[in-house]
Image (tube, rainbow, N blue to C red):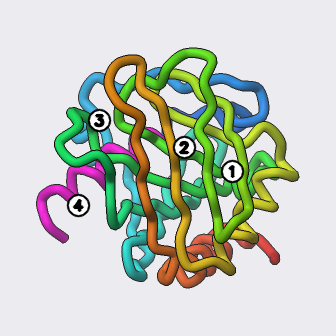
Amino acid sequence: MNTIGQLLAAMLAVLVMLLPADAAHHKKKPKAAETPARQAETSGAEQLGQSGSWTAYRAKDGTGQVCYVVGQPEKAEPPGVARKPPVAMVTHRPGEKISNVVSFVEGYSIKPGSEVRIDIGGSIFDLFTKDDSAWARTAELDRMIVTSLAKAKRVTVRGEPQKGPGTIDTYALAGFPKALALIDKACSVKR
């Protein structure tokens, strides 16, 4: 894995560990870690496999096992915008009977009150936002989005930062079903 990929994986491991289990369904955002790379090194996250631009992980936190898949966009526009690497995630927390939590980290402070819009093969979903992240409003919407991601070729994510131009990130989904299957198996999630 290249240096950027290692740093990204480390940051995401910390984000998943900090994400309260019900954040997506209660419109909360986890606190950002001061040193995500260092905390991820000690978090014990295990890489389960990689498929295309999607990587599957398993870790443990205070609530038990956590399984998550992380995707990196194939294209981020406009080029040259100052931001951390954007990522897409799907998380399972079987100890809390939570699965398929969808989130997108935009890599910048999102304009308050705005939504992040995702387009999955022509199906449009608007996600609520806080700080630098976006989530589906309900567990049912999470399931619909994950089902759509598993069947489509691409997802386009549009966000609006507090300052500067809006962004459009495009994620290839060719590897998503395989990475999702890895976390489903690791956390005993049935489709």
Q: Nearer the viewer, residue 78 or 132?
A: 78
Q: Is residue 60 above or below residue 81?
A: below
Q: CA distance from mark 2 to mark 1?
A: 16 Å
- From this viewpoint, which residue is outermost toward the left? 3
Q: Nearer the viewer, residue 138 or 39?
A: 138
Give SS at disc 1. strand
Q: Which residues are magenta?
A: 1-16
Find residue 5 and name its label: 4
In magenta segment, residue 4: yes
Residue labelled with disc 2: 61
Mark sitting earlier along the chain (2/1): 2
Mark sitting earlier along the chain (3/2): 3
Residue 111 point in image, percent of width and height: 49, 19
Q: Does residue 16 appear anywhere in the picture?
A: no
Seen at 26% across and 35% down, the residue is 83
Residue 63 point in image, percent of width and height: 66, 42
Seen at 47% across and 25% down, the residue is 110
Q: CA distance from mark 3 to mark 2?
A: 15 Å
Seen at 54% across and 59% down, the residue is 68
Residue labelled with disc 1: 101
Mark sitting earlier along the chain (2/4): 4
